Each structure stands twice: as C-alpha cells, then as structure tokens.
Amino acid sequence: MNDDGRALLRHAVATLAYRARKVLRDAPEGFGDLRAAPAARRAGRILAHMGDLMDWGCHLADGEHVWNDSRPLPWDDEARRFYGAIEAFDDRLARDEPLVSTPERLFQGPVADALWHLGQLALLRRLAEAPIRGENYFRAEITVGRVGPDQADPRREFG
C-alpha cells in the first residue's frame, strides 16, 4: 500500500471540500436551475453528479464499479448530500483496509472530475452575477479529514 499516495489523495479530497465551500454557500435563489447554454447541465445536476462521483469513489476503493445517476435535490439539500458523500469517501480512505483501486486512479477518476465540475459551478456563479472571491489557495488552511462544510476561513482573499 502506498501510504504517501493515500495521504496525498486525502489532501486532494480535503482541498475539494475546502474549495466547494466557497462555491456552494450563499448561492443565489434559483441557482440550481442555471445553465450556461440550452444543452448544458443545470448547476443542480452538476452538483448531484459531484456527489455521485464521491459515492463512486467509495465503491472503487472497494473494487466495485457501481454508478448512481442521482436526480438533483433542491440546492441546499444537494450540497448536504455532496458533503455526506465526500465525508464517506474520506472515511473509507482513512481506514486501514487496503484500497483495491490505487490512490492515483481514485484521484484521476472521481476526484479530478469533481474538481473540474466545481470549476464549472464557479463559472456559473459568475454568470449568475454572484461570483466567489479569488483566494491564494497556497496559503489556505486545508486539513486532511476536514471534508464537511465547516472549513477554515480564507487567509488571503482578493478581488
């Protein structure tokens, strides 16, 4: 087992949670229905997909390829579901049990995909005229295991 890989993967998951807090909180009314173009996914569908990715990561860690395509909930409920899924994924990563999928594969699949979609939601926030503030993420207090909505306050925001 690659303990360094697992530690880095857990840090990536904590980074996803930290960055998600900025994008998911204080979304404007109706944000879940916003989309960039007629054929594009709505923000609520993107967030539901991100929760599904974290669920998938849990299954992949155990060697199972199980995919759920969840129907989006209202925005705040979907954000809670996402944080529950990311907490379950991190809990699985924290256990002493071996990972069937490698940390590298778990990063390149569910985690990287969720980071990509988080960027889409950040762009949609700007389109909704409710942009998030930029931040020097290098200075951010990101802690392995802190994957819920209760995150440290930004240390250096700008914009």
Image (spheres, helix red, strand yellow):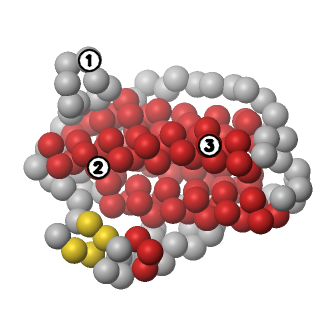
Residue 58, image quadrant: top right
Could you tell me how many numbered marks the image carries? 3
Question: Quick one: label 2 or label 3, which is nearer the N terminus?
Answer: 3
Which residue is denoted by mark 3 in the rendering?
108
State which quarter of the image contains the C terminus.
bottom left
Residue drawn at x 75%, y 59% as measured from the top left: 6
Q: Nearer the viewer, residue 101 or 44?
A: 101
The numbered dot on residue 39 is 1
Disc 1 and disc 3 in contact, CB within 8 angstroms: no
Residue type at mark 1 is: Ala
Residue drawn at x 68%, y 44% as measured from the top left: 106
Callout 1: helix, strand or loop? loop
Residue type at mark 2 is: Ala
Callout 2: helix, strand or loop? helix
How far across and down, in percent of the image, does residue 38 sit?
Answer: 20, 19
How far across and down, in percent of the image, does residue 128 sit?
Answer: 14, 44
Which residue is denoted by mark 2 in the rendering?
122
